[in-house]
Image (cartoon, rainbow, N blue to C red):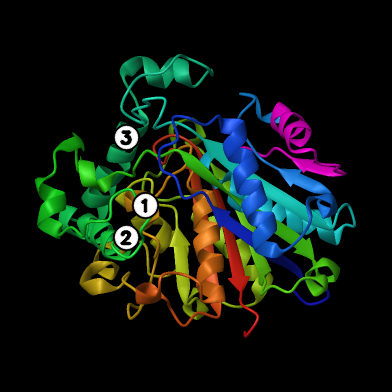
Amino acid sequence: MTGREPVYIAGAFEHPTREAPGKSTMQLHAEVARGALDDAGLPKERVDGYCSAGTPAGEAALTPLVMADYLGLDITYTDTTDYGGSSYVAHVGHAASAIRDGNCEAVLVTLAGRPRSSGQATGTGARRLRTAQDSFERIYGLTNVTAYGMAARRHMHEHGTTPEQLAAIRVAASRHAQYNDDALYSDPVSVEDVLDSRVVADPLHLLDCCVISDGGGALLVVSEDVKDELDRECVEVLGHGEAPQHHDAGRIDLTETGASKSGERAFGETGIGPEAVDYASIYDSFTITVLEAIEDLGFCAKGEGGTFVEGGTLEAPGGELPFNTDGGGLCSNHPANRGGMTKVIEAVRQLRGETNPEVQVDADLALAHGTGGSLGTRHGAATLVLGGESR
């Protein structure tokens, strides 16, 4: 980071609803945008950059045009990068680069959607063929959840990972969710509860899977000059990395994710390693997503993730690597089926000391990581390293 202009997250807001049948997606975008601006104490007129992906226009390229119009933004910079759920982690890094390049000073990032109100059963059903790859994959019954099931089964085959170890990830998330009044599922569960829930894609059980929720979130990324105008504790963007990962014409390793590259790049920008991280927000579409990311981000060696997550390692405030202290996508919120936004928001809360007191960590350095797409086919990984003002 030496010689580079500091860039900060000044505003962060998560929509409190998990089901919004009476609101449009665009209305949810507007509400989270207002929440992030109010959190930062910045007027809308100061926003000169905007990032979003996928919704509501249906085409990522149109989203900022539609939403800038709807929100009344006068902008000089836009970004439509669509890595699925990791898009919004990537957007923070892109906004930081745009600010350093002098293209803008205050970038608003928004996410919103209504899959729960729309009755989507994400990951369990077939969808229409949209790509050349779909013609070779979807016609044989591949869905998101079965693709993640394949990854989990392969990890078990190669490394001896057990269903009980995957269940420990859900247990930790549920123990955090009990302190979150907005969590969709706030009841703590045991390893036995996870294993007793029905199998949806062997070896994954129902409680190994994330929730389906409406709502959204927003972030405001600003320059140092704008930050100095605000009466608000801000979080510095120290490092950013991203990496697409695909099956390379069949030469796929189902036990490795793009986090092995995106994490290395993010840490490389900071000059520190994973051992310095006090808190981690890790994308949790499924328990196997967390386990593989933990390995690939360098918190433990490949194949040792199962052992690592046992014994309360992920539980706040005293675990070795407290994670997803809001309950994460497994228990609290996975808005629009894209959970990267909430990962950044909770990391900001932790560094500001604003998360639920029972799970607040003494954190000066946090990581937020997103995985968008499918471990079984292709996905985008994005990683941020963030620092608090007291660091």
In the rendered image, the quadrant that contains the C terminus is bottom right
Going by the numbered disc 2, the residue's amino acid type is: Ala
Where's residue 105, x and y in %? 84, 58
What residue is rendered at 65% in x and 66% in y?
239
Where's residue 230, x and y in %? 77, 71
Q: Is residue 155 left or right of residue 224?
A: left
How many numbered callouts?
Answer: 3
Who is closer to the viewer here, 183 or 6? 183
Membership of 72 in magenta stretch: yes
* Magenta-tinted stretch: 62-82
Q: Which residue is mark 1?
A: 332
Q: Is residue 118 left or right of residue 274?
A: left
Who is closer to the viewer here, 257 or 381? 381
Q: Which residue is mark 3?
A: 145
What residue is rendered at 43% in x and 18% in y?
136
What residue is rendered at 50% in x and 79% in y?
363
Res. 188 visible in picture: yes
What residue is rendered at 33% in x and 28% in y?
121
Membership of 251 in magenta stretch: no
Q: Which residue is mark 2?
A: 177
Label 1 with label 3: CB-CB less than 8 Å: no
Name the front one of labels 3 and 2: 2
Q: Element under label 3?
A: helix
Where is 269 relative to 87, above or below? below
Real-space CA distance between mark 3 and mark 2, rounded to the nearest whole angstrom: 23 Å
Where's residue 95, x and y in %? 74, 53
Q: Earlier in the sequence, mark 3 or mark 2?
A: 3
